[in-house]
Amino acid sequence: MSQATLIDGKATAARVCGRIGEFVAILSGRKPGLAVVLVGEDPASQVYVRNKKRSTEEVGMFSIEHKLPAETSETDLLALVQQLNADSSVDGILVQLPLPKHLNSNLVVNTIDPGKDVDGFHVVNAGKLAVGDPTALVPCTPFGCLVLLRDLGKSLSGQEAVVVGRSNIVGKPMAALLLSQSCTVTIAHSRTKNLAATCRGADILVAAVGRSEMIPGGWVKPGATVIDVGINRIETESGKTQLVGDVHFDSAVQVAGAITPVPGGVGPMTIAMLLQNTLRTFCIREGVAEPEPTLLGVPC
Ligand code: NDP
């Protein structure tokens, strides 16, 4: 059987970032600013924050980092968020999740000015996305998945899309985005009765579960487009750590029409879309036209 087309998220992310960099380079006044807040020393979060800072600077944006100790009080964290809300040099604010357990993540996220909420997690932006309001700031990972799907050049309208996972940061916004593109959308989750049959009905299958290789090639409809959001660390027989997705790549690649690899698929798009969202909030605040990609019906 023929192999699926590999969807190269690294190349698409480089293209998006290249375009952002060109736009930022010719700005005559101040540069867009992204503030990232990290509380505690979670190793994975430290890597994400480091990568975000590097990518922000690579496109010529202004990066502000606030690293706070794990025992930071909620009052102090909320005060910092308010300070960043009021800072006119800051266009985007991102509080790295997960937060230490004594902090209320919802309260912190919903204290961010919705106009600076570049993660798109604020309830105002989630609501706007749900009602198809084009001014919504869209969560970066599903936004990146949509850009990859649009990049394939096939119409999404009328396609059967199945999203496995219903989290607020990936599954639900992904489903809303696919609906905005006129897909027929099914959201599956841990209580879905016949997950295999549900997946087999998908022209577009998005896996956002967090379980290593749980979706085998046998659940993939021949010719389907598979977007694997999962990032799971497993130990190989030789004792090395390897990154794998939620889809069993080796079997799925034999059946799918197109598929994202892990790593190198969705992952690089998440940071690219964070920068795109920051550029977007900058453009809105400065009253200048945003370069593509935009969303919700407008080309991306
Ligand atoms: P969550 O743990 O918040 O959500 C997982 C979802 O999967 C839940 O809705 C859960 O269902 C569902 N689920 C769990 N087990 C099963 C099962 N056996 N069958 C069907 N559904 C199941 O995860 P996230 O949405 O935050 O992340 C999902 C994956 O995406 C993770 O691997 C994460 O690392 C990755 N990720 C990757 C990013 C990237 O940049 N590429 C960014 C963000 C996440 P229920 O609601 O019923 O419990």
Image (spheres, helix red, strand yellow):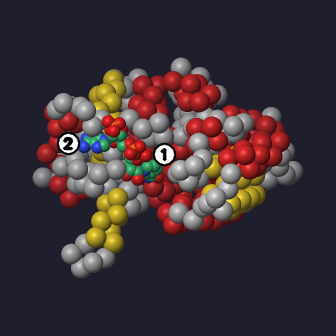
Instruction: Using a 10 Å C-alpha cutoff, classify the residue at mark 1 as few (fewer than 14 neighbours), some (14 to 19) or many (20 or more).
Output: many
- Percent x, y for residue 89? 82, 49
| Distance from the alpha carbon under mark 1 to that under mark 2 | 22 Å
Q: Which quarter of the rendered picture does the C terminus lie within? A: top right
Q: Quadrant of residue 155?
A: top left
Amino acid bearing label 2? Val
- Percent x, y for residue 13? 52, 54
Q: Residue furthest right?
A: 29
- Percent x, y for residue 163? 33, 35
Instruction: Using a 10 Å C-alpha cutoff, classify the residue at mark 2 as few (fewer than 14 neighbours), some (14 to 19) or many (20 or more).
Output: many
Q: Which residue is mark 2?
A: 220
287 to the left or right of 214: right
Is mark 1 in CB contact (under 8 Å) with mark 2? no
299 to the left or right of 281: left
Q: Which mark sits nearer the N-terminus, 1 or 2?
A: 1
Q: Which residue is mark 1?
A: 141
Residue at 77% x, 42% y is: 82
Residue at 61% x, 35% y is: 122
Q: Residue furthest top?
A: 131
Q: Ligand 1 is located in which of the four quadrants?
A: top left
- Percent x, y for residue 107? 63, 37
Q: Give above or below for 155 relative to 247.
A: above
Disc 1 under 8 Å from ligand 1? The reply is yes
90 to the left or right of 114: right
Say which of 173 and 1 sits in front: 173
**Is residue 27 in view?**
no
Q: Which label is found at residue 208?
A: none
Question: Circle 2 — which element?
Answer: loop
